[in-house]
Amino acid sequence: MEIKFSRHAKRRAKLYQIPESDILDILTGMDLQHGEHEIVKNVAGFEYPLKIVVSVEGDTATVVTSYPLKKGREK
C-alpha cells in the first residue's frame, strides 16, 4: 500500500515535531480498509497519544492530519 501525506499533514507533523517515520511505522503495521480511519496510538517520546486521520482509496492511503491528542486525556 502506498502512503502519501497531504500538505496539511506535513505542516501539522512539522508543527508538533512528529517524524513522518513514526507515522509510517504505525500505518505499515495496520490492515486498513477503504474509507476514513482515525487512529490513536501511544508513541514513545510523546507526552500525549498521537491521533492520525487516514483516508484509504484503492491501494493508496493518504494521511489527512496528525497531532497530539490532548483534549479529554489524562497524562
Image: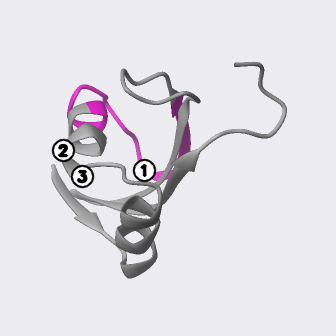
> Which mark, residue 67?
none
Residue 23, compared with residue 36, is above or below; it is above
Alpha carbons under labels 2 and 3: distance apart: 4 Å
**Helix, strand or loop at mark 2:** helix
**Residue 24 % position (x, y):** 22, 43
Q: Which residues are magenta?
A: 26-40
Residue 14, compared with residue 6, is above or below; it is above
**Residue 10 % position (x, y):** 34, 70
In the rendered structure, the answer to whether residue 47 lies left or right of residue 61 reads right
Callout in the foreground (1, 2): 2
Image quadrant containing the C terminus: top right
In the rendered structure, the answer to whether residue 49 lies left or right of residue 45 reads right
> Which mark, residue 34?
1
Would residue 33 be counted in the magenta stretch?
A: yes
Badge 3: how crowded within 10 Å, few (<14), some, or many (20+)? some
**Circle 3 residue:** 20
Which of the marked residues, 1 or 2, is nearer the chain's N terminus? 2
Q: Amino acid at mark 3?
A: Glu
Which residue, as the protein is rendered here, is positioned at the far right?
Answer: 72
Would residue 29 be counted in the magenta stretch?
A: yes
> Which mark, residue 21?
2
Which residue, as the protein is rendered here, is positioned at the far bottom?
Answer: 7
Alpha carbons under labels 1 and 2: distance apart: 23 Å
Residue 17, compared with residue 4, is above or below; it is above
